[in-house]
Image (spheres, rainbow, N blue to C red):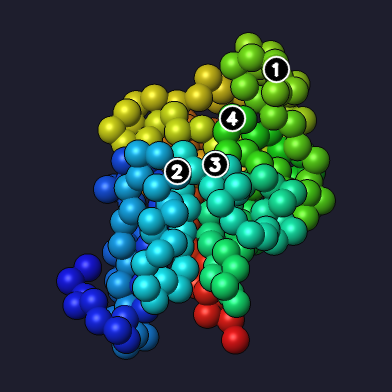
Amino acid sequence: MNTKINSSTKRYGLIGKNIAYSFSPNYFAKKFKNLRIIAAYDIFDLDKIAAIEKVFKIEHLNGLNVTIPYKEKVIPYLDNLSNPAKEIGAVNTIQFENGLKIGHNTDYIGFMDSIKPLLTPHHKKALILGTGGANKAVQYALKQLDLDCAVVSRTKDKADYTYNDLDKNIISEHQVIINTTPVGTHPDIQDMPNLPTQHLNSNHLVYDLIYNPEITALLKAAKEKKAKIKNGLEMLVLQAEAAWEIWNKQ
């Protein structure tokens, strides 16, 4: 952003590592322009989470987003957590209120509100691919939607199934499949999780949290089997909107 910083400028930003690619700065720049707000949204690319202490000292700081790899590591630097953030164990939004730094999780809101319109009565069970940070927010959202879920990973340490376990019966039993791994993200767009997509059909909903590319190799394979598909762009927009509401609630 080219916003000139002065005493009336509201400051927002994103905490993360290697985040020059981020969606957030352009998104919020457009929002500030549309709302005619004097505000700046900065990237804080931190080598270590301890450097967040310097960010907290910036004047007129109204709110922060947090992305990988700091969604869990940021928690000890905060004064309080919302109930969802506590249960999920990850923070992607920081609110400053009455001198306190409060951690929230809006990832689950973005996911929940973007998948809810696509669900039909036969969507009763979900398979979540991956055990990383995004997995926790997705599990929390599915719990709110009363969907049973099972987790798939390369090893069984934190999962119900390994990819090698997946067969026609398991795929048929789980009508919702959610990829929370980074496999298939630009530039490695030919890659996809080791899912036996030949067992997918028109009863399945396949949701990939990746938004670049718009149609991942996984979604392409699912579409060929007539499954309903969804990428992660709307989730990203909705979690950003939820963060904005938290920062600006009266």
- Which residue, given by chain and number where applicable, does mark 2 sit on? 49
Q: Are marks 1 and 3 in contact (CB under 8 Å)?
A: no
Name the residue located 57 percent from the left edge and 33 percent from the top edge: 132
Q: Residues within 10 Å of mark 3 (few under 14, many from 20)?
A: some
Label 4 amino acid?
A: Gly
Report helix, strand or loop for mark 3: loop
> Image quadrant of residue 11?
bottom left
Q: Quadrant of the C terminus?
A: bottom right
Badge 1: residue crowd in 10 Å (few <14, some 14–19, many ≥20): few
| Residue under label 1 | 157
Mark 1 or mark 2, which is nearer the start of the sequence? Answer: 2
* Callout 1–callout 4 Cβ contact below 8 Å: no
Q: Residue at x 37, y 67 (%)?
A: 58
Question: Mark 1, mark 4: which one is toward the viewer?
Answer: 1
* Category of crowding for the residue at label 4, using alpha-carbon neighbours closer than 10 angstroms: few (below 14), some (14–19), many (at least 20): many
> Between disc 1 and disc 4, whose residue precedes?
4
Judge whether 31 appears above or below 82 on screen: below
Left or right: 81 as drawn, with respect to 240: right
Provide the residue designation for mark 3. 73
Residue 130, numbered label: 4
Q: Is residue 23 visible?
A: no
Q: Earlier in the sequence, mark 4 or mark 3?
A: 3
Q: Quadrant of residue 6?
A: bottom left
Marks 2 and 3 sit apart, C-alpha to C-alpha, by 7 Å
Q: Position of residue 119 (x, y in %)?
A: 69, 53
- Pick the residue in front: 220 or 132: 132
Q: Is residue 19 above or below residue 238?
A: above
Q: Position of residue 42 (x, y in %)?
A: 31, 62
Q: Earlier in the sequence, mark 4 or mark 2?
A: 2
Distance Cα–Cα, label 2 vs label 1: 27 Å
Neighbor class of circle 2 (other Cα within 10 Å; few <14, some 14-19, many 20+) is some
In the rendered image of this protein, does residue 127 appear above or below residue 158?
below
